Amino acid sequence: MAASHLVAKTTEIAEDEAKRVTVGDQQIAIFNLDGTFYATDDVCTHAYASLSEGYIEDGCVECPLHAGLFDIKTGKAKGVPVVEDIKTFPVRVEGEDIYVEV
């Protein structure tokens, strides 16, 4: 069963930026797309790289290591060399608190 975890404050993540958080042993990237928050695995499925350090444009994050693209909302792999999707997690915002279900 998934549990909700308080992971960040909305004021900590500027628009079109991301923050890496850890829940248990899970590394998660929290993205702010136009004021809406999304959560995905932080680790690229192609090679170990932190997606929260990637470049964000048009709703996608570009892996900083080999420039593979992932759709932030769906986790879908969008460009070579990545072919495996990343996991996404439900996000809930209460006031300034961001919760992720893991």
Image (cartoon, rainbow, N blue to C red):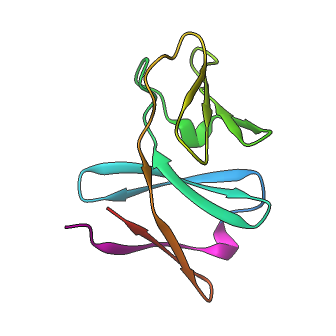
Q: Quadrant of the C terminus?
A: bottom left
Q: Quadrant of residue 56?
A: top right
Residue 2, how many percent across, how many down?
Answer: 26, 67
Please provide the residue range marked out in magenta. Answer: 1-12
**Nearest the camera: 2 or 47?**
2
Asked whether, in this view, residue 82 is left or right of residue 35, the answer is: left
Residue 6 in which image quadrant: bottom left
Camera-nearest residue between 75 and 51: 75
Classify residue 74 as left or right of residue 7.
right
Is 35 one of the magenta-colored residues?
Answer: no
Magenta span includes 9: yes
Residue 54, horizontal then vertical, whole percent: 64, 34
Toward the viewer: 10 or 36? 36
Residue found at the far top of this picture:
81
Image quarter where the N terminus lies is: bottom left
Q: Establish if 71 lies above or below 16.
A: above
Residue at 41% across, 42% down? 87
Query: Residue reaching furthest bottom?
Result: 95
The residue located at (48%, 48%) in the rendering is: 40
How far across and how far down the image is residue 89, in percent? 43, 56
Quarter of image, res 57: top right
Please tell me whether residue 70 is drawn above or below residue 12 in the rendered image.
above
Residue 98 horizontal side relative to residue 23, left or right:
right
Q: Which residue is at 64% across, 18% downward? A: 67
Residue 71, position as x, y percentages in the image: 62, 37
